[in-house]
Image (cartoon, rainbow, N blue to C red):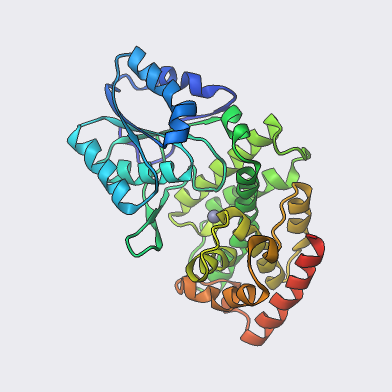
Amino acid sequence: MYNNFLPVICKIENGIIYNVVDILLSKFNEIKKVLLVSDDYIYKTYGNIVHKKLDENNIESKLILIQNSDFTVAQSIGEQALELDVDSIIGIGGGKVQDVCKFASFVSKKNLFSVPTTLANDGLCSPIAVLKMKNGFTKSIGTKLPLALFIDIDIIKDAPIELIKAGIGDILSNYTAIYDWKIAEKNKKEDVNDFAIEISDIAFNVINNISICNIKDDVFLKQLAEAIVLSGIAMHIAGTSRPCSGSEHLFSHTIDRLYKKNNLHGLQVALGSVVAAYLQNRDYKVLINLLKKYEINIKPSKLGLSYDEYINCWKNAKESRKDRYTILNEINEDTLLKKIKDIYIIIEEEFK
Ligand SMILES: [Zn+2]
């Protein structure tokens, strides 16, 4: 059953948590023994629903509750999957749970069934696991996509609104990431994958074109979930995060590397995207308008970044991944400094 391509099941519906096991069993009759991975809160709130269904269907299961997404935790789950000889891993939870499950299923070659409980970033259906290493830094590790994906709109709606806003922010970054990737190709640094670019662009336009302003609206959440899934697929097809990660992500990585502000990733990259669009001499207002429409305040001071820290992060952003050619490689230091100062004033003015 191990699948190295795209999810076979993708359900984005209200109340789907109650049907996860029935749907899996109707599609994969070889499921006999699973690892159920969650965290304490999510398990008590939603995970137990799936666990009960597994018991009712006489599916043997072992529950693992995680507290963090350390590399060692992910490794240990992979080991347990092999030692217990389970056929599948079911991950119920937010990004940390999904990251450790992606890695564990990848190393153990077990099926991965994902039940994400937030839409905070585009990693939900991406082949990349972000894990914390012993030295305190995070590492993005190439893994695989889940074989089945269940996104329950009722659960997503109950999550803190900031998580939904962060998910929107991560989708907006496609706007500048695509452009940066094309710059890299123009300079013969990398080949783009047109299909991945199209899918990433569609994901951005889902959010760009939707008229609903209430981000807790069921239709809006379904579309955001779809956009996030598409972004993950774009990265999978490209074999790299480049269709959804450009200079705006380098900026965010630099904040994490230098200052560890504990902001949500999607909010940092949304700020990065507005600045990157300005650096790219493109219509940055389209991003500002979208952020304001959904009441997402990304001004540096709101994200705990002082003026000097903001400037310093842009000055050092290129260093975060030297192999990534972006707009930052196209402008000299003086121009960069002038532009990031100009857009800083605009952003602080727009997001009062
Ligand atoms: Zn991202």
Task: Pick out the residue farthest to the left.
Answer: 83
On the image, the x and y values in percent for residue 90 come to 37, 32
Q: Determine the image quadrant of residue 328.
A: bottom right
| Quarter occupied by the N terminus | top left
- Rendered-image quarter of ligand 1: bottom right
| Quarter occupied by the C terminus | bottom right
On the image, the x and y values in percent for residue 130 come to 42, 53
Q: How many marks on residues?
A: 0
On the image, the x and y values in percent for residue 247 come to 58, 67
Residue 189 seen in this snapshot: no
On the image, the x and y values in percent for residue 243 come to 54, 56
Residue in view at x 30 percent, y 19 percent: 59
| Above or below 57: residue 151 | below
Identify which residue, 261 or 337, lies in the foreground: 261
Residue in view at x 69 percent, y 47 percent: 205
Residue 6 seen in this snapshot: yes
11 vs 87, left or right, is right
Task: Pick out the residue farthest to the top.
Answer: 56
Identify which residue, 153 or 137, lies in the foreground: 137
Residue in view at x 68 percent, y 68 percent: 275
Residue in view at x 44 percent, y 20 percent: 23
